Image: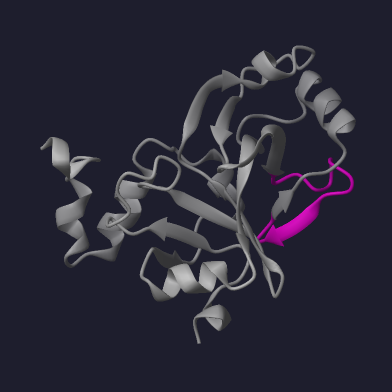
Amino acid sequence: MISEKLKKGQLLIAEPSIIGDLSFNRSVILLAEHNSEGSVGFILNKPLKYTIRDLVPDIEANFKIYNGGPVEQDNLYFIHNVPNLINESIEISSGIFWGGDFELTRNLINEGKIKKDNIRFFLGYTGWETQQLENEMASNSWIIAENLYQNKIIGKSTTDFWKEKILELGGDYILWSNAPENPLLN
């Protein structure tokens, strides 16, 4: 059964057939939660034009902000790999944590104790209601991949991440790796 394959900490790679969906076309999502009530994830490879300083002026860093997904895009979320520094965070898996004490986090960034390879900020998140993600899996919208990068995924380059994951799949997917984002414009 598909739901048994899904678990938090995995990567969801958008099938090449997802065309025209600005949020999910060529997305790689870290699944942060998956249970009987639904699923939550963060898009890892869609940087925005903002930095954390643009949104929180008292943070003295220029860490990029990413589009986490279409849900609650007026809220800031973060994942990190420093649970020993950030209290109240929730482990996703493999040393990756979600959220925590934001005031403490701000201070640690300003003190230089948290670097860009330790934390990633998102506007919004990706969410699925009960069985919604399973239904999308059944309709072949997503490919499940293990997160082989573990907690190093936070510092992973974003521009070609989807293409890298598609090339790793091999076979017919190799053709899609160099296809234009919108084949209708080809």
Left or right, residue 140 beside residue 117:
left
Q: Which residues are magenta?
A: 80-95
Instruction: Give the main secondary structure, helix, strand or loop, of the magenta stretch.
Output: loop
The x and y percentages for residue 90 are: 79, 55
The foreground one among 139 and 43 is 139
The x and y percentages for residue 182 are: 22, 40
Left or right, residue 138 beside residue 98:
left
The x and y percentages for residue 42 are: 58, 48
The foreground one among 170 and 38 is 38
Left or right, residue 162 beside residue 86:
left
- What residue is drawn where x is 85% and y is 24%? 107
- What residue is drawn where x is 60% and y is 62%? 9
Residue 117, by quadrant, is top right
Left or right, residue 37 beside residue 173:
right
The answer, for residue 12, to whether it is visible in the render is: yes
Q: Is residue 97 above or below residue 23?
A: below
